[in-house]
Structures are given as C-alpha cells and as structure tokens.
Image (spheres, coloured by chain):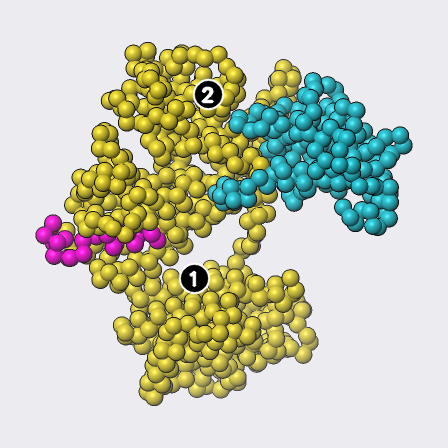
C-alpha cells in the first residue's frame, strides 16, 4: 500500500464513521430540532466530510456535501426553526450521502437514486433562504457568539486600540503592590496552529498566575463561518492586558517557543496611572469568566472549535488498535494465565512450604487475573452505537408500515465484545422489523380496542444475566397465536402433533426453516420470515434465542449471548478417562437417573423419562467410539441439554465441575469435526475438547417423540 | 521444486528418521522442535491423527508421521520428537522417531524422486538428496499440509466463520 492509499484508507474509514454518526445525529435532531449544539455537531461532520471528499477527488460526494453544508450553516447561524418538511430533506440528504459514498468507493459511474432530486431541493432551499435579509454570521450570531465576544472584550464597533487603552486604565485602578501590568501583543501567523500554538494556550498560561487578564482579538481578517478555515489562524493581532505578580522574564518564558517578532511584552508603568475608570468589578469578573472558560475548554473542545476567536482542540485520548493485535495480546495473556496456573498448581512447588514463595505465587495470580480482566475489557464496547443505529431502523420501518412506533431503549451502556457487535446488527434489524411489521397491530383502532395506546411500543434492552448478555426486542403487539403455530408446524411436517411441547418450544418453532416461506398466515403475521437466518447467526456467536409471548400483550425475543466470543462457561465432564466440556448455556440439568426412569426400546435405543418427556440418551463414549467399560445409565451421569433437534441426555461417567474456559480452535484440519467446536486448556495444561451438542445424536436415529 | 534443480544454491534442511529412512524438511518451514508431550485424543479422526497438544497455550494438531506414511506404529522413546511445521500461519506437529541434524544440501545434488521403492506415498516427496552414505527424502510440506489441512475448503470456511 502506498502512502497515498494508506491515507485514503484512513479517509474512507473516517468518512464511514462520520456518515454513521450523521445518520444517528440527524435523527436525534429530527426529534428535537431546536438543539443547535447538535446541529453544530452535524455541521462539523459534514464540513470534515466535504474537505476529505474533495481532497480525494470524490467530487460527486464533495459537491453534494458542499450544498448540504450551506443549508446546515444557514440554520446553524440564524437559529431559525427548521421546518418539518426540511427535516425530512435533511434525513434524505444523509441517505444520499451514504449512497454517494458507496458509489464513490465502488467507482460506479452512475449517481445514486435521489441524488439530483435531493441536491436540487437543497439548492432551492438555499436560494430561498439567501433571499431573505441576512446579516453576516458573526455579527448576528446568537448567544454563543455574543457571549464569547464580550468575554474576550471584543466589540466590533469599538477600535481595538481604544479598548486596550480603556482596559489598561481600568486595570490600573485595581493594581496593588507587587502586581505588574503588562501589555502583550501577539502577532501569530496563519500557520501557528500547525506549529502547536494558539492564543488560548498563552492566555491559559498567563491566566494561571494572573490576577486579572483581558484580551482583545482583532477579528477583521476572520472570514464568515461559511468560508472559515478551521486549521488556519486568521486572527493576526491579539492584545493582552494582564495584571500579574510575575516578572517580565517569567512572562516571556511563556512565549519562548515563538519567534521574537511574534510577540512584544511591555510593562506599563504604574506611575502613569492617573486616569480613573469605573467598572472595576466588571474586569475582575472577566478574569473569572476566562478562568471558567478555560475549564470549559478542557472539558470539551466542541464549542470552541466553531468560534473563530479560539481554536483549541483537546485531543481525544483514544487510539485505534487493529483487532488482530488485540487478539494476539489476548492469546498471549491466555498463555500467561495458563503458565501461572501451572506454577500455582505444580505439585513440586506446592510441597515447598515457604511463605514467601506462596505469597509470590498469590501475587502473581492476582496480577495475572487483573491483566486478563483488563485485556478482556479492551475488547468490550458499549452497545449504544448499535442501538442508535436501530433507532433509524425503527423510524424507517414505522414510516414504511405507517404504524406509529415509540421506541424505548434500555441498557445502552451494557458492554459487549466488539467482534460480536458487528455481527449483531443484522439479526437485530431483522427482529425489529419483524416486531414492527408483524408484531404490532396494523390498525391503531385494534390497539385501542384492546386497551392499549394507539402508538405501538418497541423496547430494546441489553442487560447481563447469569454470565451472559441478553439483548431483547419487545413489542406490545398482539403476540403469537400458539394454536396457529402448532397447526402450521404440523402442516409443514415440522412436528407430528403428538409431542408435548412447552410454550417456549412452540415459539421456537417459528424459527424453524420450514416456517420461513412466503406463504404465511395472517394472524401469525409472517413472523418467521427469515427468523431461521437470525437464529443461525446468533448460534454462530454461540448464543441462543428465547421467545416469550402472550397473546394480545406482546412478544419478547431475547438473544442470549456469551460475554465474549473467546470465553464460555463450560461444564466439565469425564468419560473414558477423557475430559470434555459442555457449554453451560445449553445444559438444562444434570442428574444420576433412577433405574426406573430409564427405558430401553428396541431399535430405538435408551430413553429417560423426565416429567412426561422421553429424552433419548446419548452415550458420549459410543459417539466418540471410545473404548470403555459399558455401564448402565443409572451408574453414570446424564447431562440433559437443549439442542436444535430437541432435548437429549448426554451420558458421561462423571461430572468434574464448572468453569470459564477460553475457546481455542483445533486448527483447520480438525475444524470439520462437527461434534467438537474447539478446545480449551485446563489449569493443569491439559486440553479438553468442547462439545457441540447440536451435532450429537443418538446412534440409532431415533425420533424424539417415541413413547 | 523445479527451482531446486535449476538454480544451484545451498538450502538447509532438518533431517529426521522414521525407522531406517531419513527425511528432510526445508528449515524455513520449521517453527520448532519439541520433545514428545501429552497428546489429547480427538475422537472421530483418522488413526494417524494423534490428537492435539498444548503448545504454550495454542492448540496444535499432531500427526503420527509413521502412520501417515503407512508405516508400522512404534513405541515412544526418549528420541521421539514433535516437529512443529508452519505454513501460512497454520501449525501442525509431526511426530518422528528421531531428529538427526540440519544439513546443507546444494540444490544441484537434489534429484527427482523415484516413483517406487519407498515405504511412503511418493506424492509427498519432492526430491532426493545424498548426504554422506545416506539418501534423504525431501518432503513437500505444502503437499503434506494440503492432505491434512485443507481437506475441504467449503467446510473449513463454514466452521471458521464463527470464530
């Protein structure tokens, strides 16, 4: 990759992020179109995008964004209310930006649909706005700008020299013994930001010691915001009046990195203090304001960056790391944990009864644990961004279906493995669309009749539950009609109808591939269209889906996911001298059966009766062809697990325990073993294989419905 | 392999024994050589697939090279060694009877493998070389890998997607 390509790749990534953020912000703005901070935020994003797009020759994107920026700038500077239909245009524009970006990336010759239309609308909008009498942005800027103007003592009507003179006089009035009054003139070049200086930096430095400080910015060269170049300094002259105990040398130190011609410091002789000026308090107040302002600036640079007078960007203290590197780090830490366990459990070391050694080992294990936790946390990100994306989905689906939907989001701060988040979006979109399209009643009258509000509610929740993360989508629609599901399942041959199915098993049927056909029943309202795809993708993440529904009240679809992809909670079992791990997520219960409840059926194998259900017994030693002494089920342990094909009871010799294990792949050559998902390294360094319970079947292909 | 015979330059090979026969693997393919260690049996695999080992936290499949080449199994002894070979970031361990040396072989001394006369499937042999009195069969690691690793691309993709 050439340097240029690298830069381009960074741009593309950045642009993608900006667009994603725009997408979210524009919707938030749609909800609250008086939030001008947010509008500024959007404007900045669009502005950056414009610069980048043009720099890389994405002219179509650049052109569009340029006009869009003009519109935003208009509203942002006039603080005019944005009319509802224009809001719609904004949202549409963001869509166009997304599409153009794709076109640019794929070097498609055609403009995306809606490009010209949207652009034309924008141009019309600008034209209509431009015709109105309009003051230049700076003068007519609202509170934010006038505030700053007064803070920095800049009053356009007043000549700077006069203002400086006034300030000097008023400062003399409050000058005490031991305080010196200086006038500092800064003449910084346009490139000073790039050299790492800005006026506020010096003001901050001076302000640390000063009793009072007042500054005057010469704004005459500052372009209106539309043409304002953020990384160039347009303020050529700044005068600072400072009352401070510092000596001239101390003051000069602040400027030692500037060229000599860029600053002058002059001590104002107190003897000359003759003139009496009122407004003393005002000045002191101004010093305080500056102090406050500095604090604000440290907290967030966002406000300062859109005011021409100050341009401080507080660097975000984040770095981007290739996830591959994180994985490597994670692997190494895994090794560290194993090595540490090896030491801690080593028999030879354990026999040494020396306090210092045991203490050292204990410390080592604590540190290792801490490192492991921290490395784990590196991979975790809040689910907020994904949820924000879903707001868009809800909005669009709601418009398309014509159903009023109120979205409630809970637990946005829940953290989840980054690699998992990426694969969660699609299933979530699917589920949400289903919930709105099919879950909610299409007629609000029907809702009112059922005693519900006309507006449907969709709730998005993320929370922790017993070592797993649950993401649920609930609607308050009409719920799933169990009878119809059963009827349909029998029709389709998914079930025979003889089974005793629990509610959750019935609901689970709608995720069967057999249900995902276009031919759907109206009351079931097509739920199941593509739900099997959702199920598969969640299972790929080693998670599962649970459905809960009450007719007339609503449906909740929960995705239960492991905390991370790398670690699962496993149940360690032993059979024929080998240790295997069963993911606890799929374990229902484990027990040693009574002799009476085990049945052997001819041609069908062994079954265990459990609360009216006949569960096939799968002997692990048989499936894996392990040579072992054959024992009766009541001499071993049955681990009852939930699989795709219903419950099975895995028969093992012994239960060993439950533990969190780091999943490792067995290498490609062994990946084709469908019964095994991977391996884990136990504390003693041994490897235990992790079972894929869905691939375990009784050796004799017995149906699970026998009696 | 043609390039070996065309250009005349010295390549280094790790040589090892399986029974009486000496084999060589290009040194740049070898990641490390470790003593025999506990191998965890993986069910439902061909007999030559001995299982997996824990190499400092990584799980690596281990092939019994004798069985792979259709030779008689042999009791492990103090010379039994696992050679970890790496190709395209994939590691596999090969259990061999005894590791001999790292030999420099002039590529001019390499010759085409015979089509018969060896205990092993000649597919895996890319060249023969003479070192002192011994004939060394140079193994084509890629072919060994293809046979053991890339069994079915389709299946592999399916399973690795979830990782």
Q: Which residue was labeled with disc 2?
A: A622
Q: Position of residue A32 (x, y in %)?
A: 30, 65
Image check: A672 left or right of A536?
Answer: right
Q: Residues within 10 Å of mark 2 (few under 14, many from 20)?
A: some
Tell me, yes or no, if residue A418 can be seen here. yes
Q: Residues within 10 Å of mark 1 (few under 14, many from 20)?
A: some
Q: Is residue B75 above or below residue A275?
A: above
Q: Which residue sits at x=25%, y=54%?
A: A436
What's the colour of chain A in the image?
yellow
Image check: A581 left or right of A124?
Answer: right
Residue placed farthest to the left in the image? A449
Magenta span of residues: A429-451
The chain under label 2 reads A
Q: Main secondary structure of the magenta part?
A: helix
Q: CA distance from mark 1 to mark 2?
A: 52 Å
Between B104 and B117, the one lying in front of the other is B117
Q: Which residue sits at x=42%, y=68%?
A: A99
């Amino acid at each position: 990759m050439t340097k240029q390509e690298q830069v381009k790749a960074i741009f593309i990534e950045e642009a993608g992020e900006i667009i994603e953020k725009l997408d979210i912000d524009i919707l938030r703005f749609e909800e609250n179109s008086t939030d001008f901070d947010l509008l500024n935020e959007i404007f900045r994003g669009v502005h950056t995008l414009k610069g980048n797009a043009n720099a890389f020759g994405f002219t179509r994107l650049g052109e569009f964004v340029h006009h869009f920026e003009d519109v935003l700038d208009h509203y942002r500077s006039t603080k005019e209310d944005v009319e509802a239909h224009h809001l719609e245009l904004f949202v549409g524009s963001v869509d166009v930006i997304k599409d153009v970006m794709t076109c640019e990336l794929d070097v498609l010759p055609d403009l995306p649909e809606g490009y010209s239309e949207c652009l034309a609308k924008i141009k019309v909008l600008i034209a209509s706005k431009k015709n109105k009498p309009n003051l230049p942005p700076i003068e007519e800027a609202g509170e934010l700008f006038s505030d700053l103007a007064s803070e920095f003592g800049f009053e356009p009507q007043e000549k700077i020299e006069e203002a400086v003179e006034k300030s000097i006089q008023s400062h003399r009035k409050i000058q005490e013994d031991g305080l010196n009054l200086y006038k500092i003139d800064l003449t910084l070049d346009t490139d000073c930001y790039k050299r790492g200086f800005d006026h506020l930096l010096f003001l901050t430095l001076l302000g640390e010691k000063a009793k009072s400080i007042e500054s005057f910015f010469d704004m005459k060269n500052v372009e209106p915001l539309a043409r304002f170049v953020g990384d160039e300094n347009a303020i050529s002259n700044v005068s600072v009046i400072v009352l401070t105990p510092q000596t001239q040398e101390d003051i000069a130190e602040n400027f030692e990195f500037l060229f000599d011609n860029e600053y002058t410091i002059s001590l104002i002789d107190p003897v000359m203090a003759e003139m009496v000026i009122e407004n003393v308090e005002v000045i002191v107040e101004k010093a305080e304001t500056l102090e406050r302002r500095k604090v604000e600036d440290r907290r967030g640079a966002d406000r300062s960056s859109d005011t021409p007078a100050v341009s401080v960007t507080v660097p975000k203290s984040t770095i981007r790391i290739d996830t591959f590197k994180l994985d490597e780090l994670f692997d190494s830490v895994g090794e560290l944990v194993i090595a540490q366990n090896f030491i801690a459990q080593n028999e030879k070391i354990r026999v040494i009864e020396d306090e210092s050694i045991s203490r050292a080992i204990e410390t080592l294990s604590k540190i290792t644990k801490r490192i492991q936790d921290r490395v784990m946390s590196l991979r975790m990100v809040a689910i907020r961004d994904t949820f924000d994306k879903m707001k868009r989905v809800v909005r669009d689906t709601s418009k398309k279906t014509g159903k009023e939907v109120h979205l409630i989001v809970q637990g946005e701060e829940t953290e989840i493995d980054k690699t998992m988040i990426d694969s969660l979006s699609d299933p979530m979109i699917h589920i949400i669309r289903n919930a709105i399209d099919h879950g909610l009643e299409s007629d609000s009258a029907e809702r009112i009749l059922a005693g519900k509000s006309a507006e449907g509610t969709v709730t998005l929740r993320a929370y922790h539950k017993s070592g797993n993360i649950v993401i649920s989508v609930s609607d308050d629609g009409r719920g799933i009609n169990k009878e119809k599901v059963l009827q349909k399942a029998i029709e389709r041959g998914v079930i025979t109808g003889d089974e005793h199915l629990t509610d959750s098993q019935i609901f689970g049927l709608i995720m069967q591939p057999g249900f995902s056909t276009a031919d759907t029943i109206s009351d079931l309202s097509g739920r199941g269209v593509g739900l099997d795809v959702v199920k598969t993708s969640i299972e790929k993440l080693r998670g599962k889906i649970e459905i809960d529904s009450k007719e007339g009240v609503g449906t909740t679809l929960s995705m239960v996911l492991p905390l991370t992809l790398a670690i699962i909670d496993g149940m360690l079992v032993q059979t024929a001298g080998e240790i295997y791990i069963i993911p606890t997520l799929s374990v229902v219960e484990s027990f040693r059966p009574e002799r009476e409840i085990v049945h052997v059926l001819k041609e069908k194998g062994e079954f265990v009766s459990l609360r009216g259900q006949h569960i096939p017994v799968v002997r692990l030693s048989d499936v894996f062809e392990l040579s072992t002494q054959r024992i009766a089920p009541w001499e071993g342990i049955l681990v009852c697990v939930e699989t795709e094909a219903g419950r099975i009871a895995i028969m093992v010799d012994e239960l060993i325990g439950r533990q969190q294990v780091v999943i490792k792949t067995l290498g490609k050559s062994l990946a084709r073993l469908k019964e095994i998902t991977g391996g884990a390294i136990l504390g003693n360094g041994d490897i235990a294989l992790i079972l894929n319970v869905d691939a375990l079947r009784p050796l004799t292909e017995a149906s699970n419905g026998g009696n | 392999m043609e390039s070996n015979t065309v250009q005349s330059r010295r390549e280094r090979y790790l040589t090892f024994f399986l029974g009486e026969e000496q084999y060589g693997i290009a040194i740049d393919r070898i990641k490390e050589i470790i003593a025999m260690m506990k191998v965890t049996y993986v069910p439902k695999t061909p007999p030559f697939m001995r299982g997996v080992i824990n190499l400092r936290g990584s799980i690596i499949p281990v092939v019994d090279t004798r069985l792979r080449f259709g030779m008689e199994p042999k009791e492990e002894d103090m010379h039994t060694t696992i050679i970890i070979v790496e190709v395209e970031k994939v590691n596999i361990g090969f259990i061999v009877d005894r590791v001999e040396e790292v030999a420099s072989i002039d590529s001019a001394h390499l010759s085409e493998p015979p089509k018969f006369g060896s205990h092993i499937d000649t597919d895996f042999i890319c060249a023969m070389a003479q070192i002192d009195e011994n004939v060394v069969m140079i193994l084509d690691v890629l072919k060994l890998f293809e046979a053991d690793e890339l069994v079915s691309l389709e299946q592999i993709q399916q399973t690795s997607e979830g990782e």
